[in-house]
Every structure is written in structure tokens, then in C-alpha cells.
Amino acid sequence: MTDYLRTLFLHPPSIEGFDGGAGARYQARREVRSFWYPTWLAQPAALVPGSRLLDAPPADLTLDDVRPLARDYDLAVLHTSTPSFAHDVQVAEALRAENPSLRIGFVGAHVAVHPDASMAASRAIDFVAGNEFDFTIQDVARGRPLATIPGLTYRVNGSCATTPARAPLEDMDRLPFVVDVYHRDLDIDRYVIGYLLHPYVSLYTGRGCRSKCTFCLWPQTVGGHRYRTRSVDHVVAEIAHAQRLFPQVKEYFFDDDTFTDDLPRAEAIARGLGKLGVTWSCNAKANVPEATLRVLRENGLRLLLVGYESGNQQILNNVKKGVRVDVAREFTRNARRLGIKIHGTFIMGLPGETPETIEETIRYATEIDPDTIQVSLAAPYPGTALHRDALARGWLENEALVDGRGVQASALGYPHLPRTAIFDSLETFYRRFYFRPRKIFQIVGEMARDGAVARRRLKEGVEFLGFLRRRRRA
């Protein structure tokens, strides 16, 4: 058996209240604090025997809690993002001070897009990994010379060198199950998403997305625009294994960018899950045919997370969303008729936004009436077409994606629509959607039917009102 370096996979501690969103270290303090699983770290951790995955934010661990662990490891791999990068560098420097011989690497979309600038940020960073880093990190943990490992930028003789890019993984079944790492290292009760049943488990069944949305980070940086998938049997086997590991889980969530990109495969997985008797949810585009929705629903689908983004067709065209507003409206009606719940996501401030389109989107959201919504500000992440367009056209009025308190900042502004107006539209959207009698009665009804739901909703309500207060002070 190959000897591996003692390896710590670390989702670093961060500012109080930082959201553990998509891929972890996603964006900001959200309206209701939520935690996704650190799957992008769990996957390479599953490839490195004897490793440990430490997810600091859900465990409320501070830097003082984490720093002493540096003495116990030879290698630390930290997941980072654009909003959290500066703070994560401080964590790396603290670990290095604790153990000068510790090798430290960063992974994530930010360092994949800006490897040289990331290395220049601190000498505590020994290497950064490119796009799909699972087997790259396994090679590092095996102790192979960095110069021989594809997909790295590393420090050598006072400067930096970059190896050839690692080819995208095609045989996705080569990846081991992540649920074993979850079971070994994580407390699943700490992972809470307001619109998912609790406790839940999330994982990926594939990588990449066929859509070309200009704002979406993952396909443009680490995943690509081909949907490379695990086999149906591999996915169903992992869920069956998870059932044995976590008999208390009430819902499984497939975090693929667009699980419904391959409809026959989605139906085949659904039928396999139906035989297991599990409840599950997934990301979907707002154009899934009614026939497929019916198959998914009959085999345990409970909820779809759907990116509507805007109610204005021209804005959807501007960002290459690839969905028509009328199709999305019909899709939503079909889902509701079948009893499928929807968590809808919207974005304020995309190219073409005006006061009139903001109003149009708010009216559209209240008309189609998803069960729950999330409203974000357009975020021009480095590596995306939106970021390139913003730089070229002078839309980028603020480089920071979050403010000093971790609240999402409005970075884009237009001659006809200042970023302050975009920032204010988010609160308006939430208030007009949730403070309607129909929506209030719906929420109260859910609480009356289930005491556990009632306790969660009360806690989330307090967090949501606090979120609105923080925004007014921003």
C-alpha cells in the first residue's frame, strides 16, 4: 500500500455567520444561515487513506480551535473562494506559523482562475490546484514531486511553476463514495437548508452543465459545459449505502448544476431511488417536460431547486439562460399540479436590468409563486463571462463581492440603474413575496401540521428579519 502524507482537508473558519453555501464558502451571510456539505473536499478526502475532513463553520470552530491541528499533519488542503480568499490566507499563515514544515495547498474556483495571483498572496501557500483537483490532490498526498503532477501551480526556487492542465475526468465512476467521509468526519445534524427536510445529505452525480449562463461560476471555471456523469447503478448504490450509514436522513439532494440535463438518465436514477423508497430533491432547469416530472414525482422527488433568475425575457437572453419565460411558467404549473415543491432563485442586477424589469420580475415571482425563494445580487465572479463583460463595459462599480460583515455587496451598476438601487431591490423583492397573506397562510399551515417544521420556521424567521435589518444598516 502506498504511504500517504498525513492530510487535513480543511474548510477554514470564517467570519461569524458566513454562509456555508454551494461548494462551501460560496458568497456571503445569507438571509437564513444554511450549510451545504463540503463535497468538493470530501471527494479527494475519499481518495486519501487516513485523511481527515474538518468543516469549521458548521461546527462553529474558530482559528484558535483549528490552529493546533497543524502539528498533527504533513499536508493541509484548504477550499477557498473569491469572497473568502483573504481570510483563508490568514488561516494558512496561522497554520504555517504553528507548523513550519506543513505543506499547504489551496483548491477552488478562485485559485483555478487566478493561480499566479493566489500564489503571490502569501508564501504560506505552497501550491494551488486547477479545475478538477481530486486526483491531483491524491498525487500530492502520495508524496509525488509536484513538478510531475498535472494541474498544479507550485513554489520552486523562489518563484512559481505551472504543470500542464489535468484532463477532465471522463469515467466518473472512478470517484469513490463521499458518504463514507461524511460518516467518518461530519455531524450531519449541523447541515441545515431551509427548504430541505432535516437531516439531509447532498452529493453530486455528475459534473458540468450544458447551459451557458454568463453569470454561473462552476461550469465556467471548474466543471465545464459537458455533463459528465456517474452511472445510474453507481449513484443508486451510493444512496443505498447512505441509507445504511444514516438511517435518520429524511432527504437526499443531488447538487449537480442541472440534474435534469440528461432526462433519460434522471428518470432511470429516479426509478432506482423509487425502489429504495427515499425522498430526494435536485437542481433543475425550468423546462422539464411534464412526462419526466411525473416519473420523478412517482419515484420520490419532493422538491426542485430552479433558477428562474428574471421574469424578463430579454434579460434571460442577455445572460444566455436558454429558457423562455412562458415555458418556465408552464413548467411551474405542471410541477405544482403534480405536488412537486419548488425553491426558486432570482438574481437582481443582471445586464439589461431596469427599474421596470425589477418590477416585472417581482410580479412574475408572485404570479408563479414558488414555495420558497432566494434572491441574490448579480455577482461577477472572476472567470465568468459576466465578469469579463463588466470589466469591458465599465459596469464593475465595486470590486468586493461582500462587505466587511460578510453581507453580499452590489458590485454591478449601470448608467440607468445605480448599484444602490439594485441593492435596495433585494429587500423589496423579499418583502413583497413573503409578506403576502397567501404566503403567510401557507407558512403558518406548514407550521401547524408539523412541530419540527414550526420550530425551524420560527428560527428562520428571526434570522430573516435580522438579515433585513443588517441590509438596511449596510
Image (tube, helix red, strand yellow):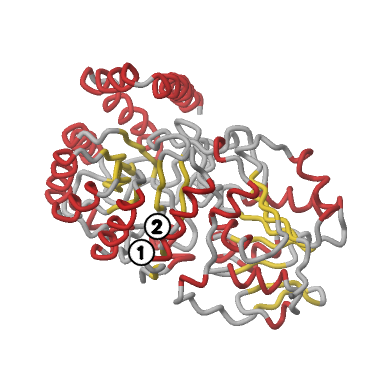
The answer to whether residue 181 is above or below residue 232 is above
Q: Is residue 264 visible?
A: yes
Image position, residue 271 (x, y; %): 28, 56
The kind of residue on which mark 2 rests is Asp
* Helix, strand or loop under label 1: loop
Q: Which residue is mark 2?
A: 256
Q: Left or right of 24: which side holds 303?
A: left
Residue 68 sits in which quadrant?
A: top right
Q: Left or right of 305: which side holds 390?
A: right
The answer to whether residue 244 is above or below residue 176 is above
Residue 344 sits in which quadrant?
A: top left
- For label 1, the crowd category at 10 Å Cα-Cα, with few meaning under 14, some 14 to 19 and many 20 or more, is many
Disc 2, disc 1: CB below 8 Å?
yes
Q: Left or right of 140: which side holds 441?
A: left
- For label 2, the crowd category at 10 Å Cα-Cα, with few meaning under 14, some 14 to 19 and many 20 or more, is many
Residue occupying image coordinates x 63% and y 33%: 16
Residue 42 sits in which quadrant?
A: bottom right
Q: How many marks?
A: 2
Image position, residue 413 (x, y; %): 38, 45
Q: Left or right of 99: which side holds 196?
A: left
Residue toward you, 376 or 225: 225
Residue toward you, 89 or 189: 189
Residue occupying image coordinates x 50% and y 25%: 470
Q: CA distance from mark 2 to mark 1?
A: 8 Å
Q: Which residue is mark 1?
A: 209
Residue toward you, 350 or 41: 41
- Sequence-wise first label, 2 or 1: 1
The kind of residue on which mark 1 rests is Cys
Residue occupying image coordinates x 46% and y 28%: 471
